[in-house]
Image (spheres, helix red, strand yellow):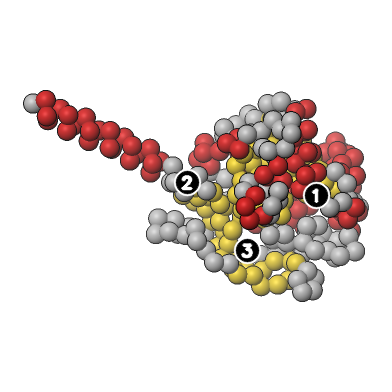
Amino acid sequence: MKLAYLFISILQIIIATSTRVSAQEVCIEVKDREHLPNEIYENLKDYKAILIGEMHGTNESPQYVEGMVNLWLDAGRKVILGIEIYGIEQDKIDSFLSTGDFSIIQKMPYFNLRIQYGVSSKAMANLIKSCYGKPNLKIVCLDITDYRRTHNKDSMLAVCINNTLKSNPGCTMITLTGNIHNKLDSTHFGKTMGYLLYTMPNCILSRKGIASFDVVFDSGTAWCCQPDCGIHHESSYSTWKTDNCKYDNFFRMDENGNMVLYTRKITASLPLNP
């Protein structure tokens, strides 16, 4: 009888352990990128910073970020949206958020660059536009200065995020940057923004408090400037699709905690002011 009880106890432990492991493997279908399922929030709600990396010049990445912001606001959380825009444009962003006058955004130097390399897209402008009138939401321009005047862009991005969170306790930082800046591992990418956020002096974040993932895809188009500025076809090797995750759009987290936002087909977002 004791042996039977021992066997049952061991079996219960195995089942419980198995359940915990499988619970970490998450695949959530996304039907509307701008209004994400609450299950995504439940998986990410304990992180203090969410770093989203993109290939510039698509519609899908800013839409996903808008969806993330909406999730946190709907949960009654305070959010800071950090975008890869020069800090000298912060007053214009603040003015738009106060007035709702979209012409302020249209006239920003950022959206009137001589070379339109994908960041100053209609989709990015629409992301900013979607923030008007939403309580508990701030936008911060992460580039402290014009990137052409510095060789330490990632350290400046990290310092800006760190200082902003220090000044806004209780807020969650959600960022959209190029898909190198958000990386947490310095092995392949050097001292990126994501890596510095938990390693630089006086940092307030730990690595376990930061979620970092990319918007990934199979194929489609993007506005970029390689080799010339325009709409270019793009393709990628999808390592995130499984037999249990065949949706056109989804959030996925594997058993090791690695996460992505996936869309089967990306579409190019043209410059706001071509």
**Whole-number angstrom distance, CA of label 1 to CA of label 3:** 27 Å
Q: Amino acid at mark 2?
A: Asn
x, y percent for residue 180? 68, 54
Question: Could you tell me which residue is drawn at 43 percent across and 59 percent down?
Answer: 242
Question: Could you tell me which residue is drawn at 64 percent across and 41 percent down?
Answer: 50
Nearer the observer, 131 or 62: 62
Q: Which quadrant of the figure contains the C terminus?
A: bottom right
Pointer 3: what residue?
Answer: 266
Q: Amino acid at mark 3?
A: Ile
Find residue 235 and report its image quarter.
bottom right
Q: Callout 3: helix, strand or loop?
A: strand
Q: Earlier in the sequence, mark 2 or mark 1?
A: 1
Pointer 1: what residue?
Answer: 153
Nearer the observer, 214 or 14: 14
x, y percent for residue 128? 77, 46
x, y percent for residue 250? 52, 53
Find residue 165 and report its image quarter.
top right
**Whole-number angstrom distance, CA of label 2 to CA of label 1:** 30 Å
Q: Amino acid at mark 1?
A: Lys
Identify the disc placed on residue 256. 2
Q: Callout 2: helix, strand or loop?
A: loop
Question: Could you tell me which residue is drawn at 74 percent across and 34 percent down?
Answer: 201
Say whether marks 1 and 3 touch (CB < 8 Å): no
